[in-house]
Image (cartoon, rainbow, N blue to C red):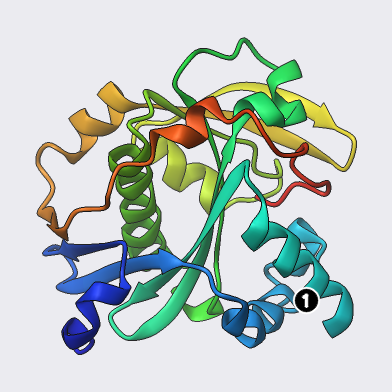
Amino acid sequence: MNHIENVYEFEAIIEDGELNQTISLRQVKITDFQILFSWMHQPHIAPFWKLNVSEEEFKAYLERTVKAEHKRVFLCFLDDRPAGYLIAYSIQHDSIRNYYQAETGDLGMHLLIGPRELLNKEHGLMIVRAMTAFLMKKYGSSRIIGEPDIRNRIVIPILKEIGGYVADTILLPHKRAALVIGEKTRFNDYMSNKNVNFIKLPSEDKDLLNEKAGALCENPSPN
């Protein structure tokens, strides 16, 4: 890991012994604008996230998102390289709660893999399972809820491989989505024989699961 000297910058660091690479996560900063703006205009991201807007509009979105009380946003690195964007959000403050039987301890998740060449089974699996492990540890959530666009043929199979299951197909105002539920017990069973370990654990943040403040998660809701 080349950026180990910057270890204090990261919320968590995960070593994936299967591909011999390291995944690190930290909170998104406004100074990450150019990375995220570029990703949102990539052909494999724009149709799903619908944030391929002007610089001014995207900056306003990013500022609202970073400051929101009902969600947390993270940048994921593969070794030294920015690789993914992750949003954890309060189910209780999002309209997704109206589309399924929400339970205490549920946490919403949106994610994307930025560089197109990392959107393959090996790297995609490594990044998504690291993101999931991070959220499970940090928020102590018993279930993670995703609603990727039904057309997403990369992320949905990965979520299923790591123990998630498609509970329903739902029609949201902006997309037809697969309601994917990832239970902690199923995810832990999947991870039990994987050579994937935290070398820096995230601090706990249970407040997001019981968030009282904040507005509904914006639509369009990212994958």
Residue neighbourhood size for the residue with mark 1, other residues' Cα within 10 Å, grouped as few (<14), some (14–19), many (≥20): some
Instruction: Reply above or below: 20 against 199.
Output: below
Residue at point 69%, 21% (across, down): 97
Where residue 125 appears, as percent x and y from the top left, is 36, 56
Q: Secondary structure at mark 1?
A: helix
Left or right of residue 87: residue 8? left
Task: Tally the numbered discs.
Answer: 1
Residue at point 29%, 32% (across, down): 187
Q: Amino acid at mark 1?
A: Lys
Residue extending farthest to the front is 213
Where residue 106 appears, as percent x and y from the top left, is 49, 24
Quarter-of-image position of residue 47: bottom right
Quarter-of-image position of residue 161: top left
Residue at point 9%, 41% (across, down): 193
Where residue 209 appears, as percent x and y from the top left, is 49, 29
Can residue 63 be seen here? yes
Can residue 52 be seen here? no
Residue behind mark 1: 59
Instruction: Reply above or below: 218 against 180.
Output: below
Left or right of residue 126: residue 91? right
Looking at this view, is 59 or 149 the one in front? 59
Where residue 35 appears, as percent x and y from the top left, is 60, 84
Quarter of the image with the N terminus in it: bottom left
Looking at this view, is 26 or 17 the one in front? 26
Instruction: Reply above or below: 210 against 70.
Output: above
Residue at point 66%, 15% (across, down): 100
Looking at this view, is 103 or 79 the one in front? 103
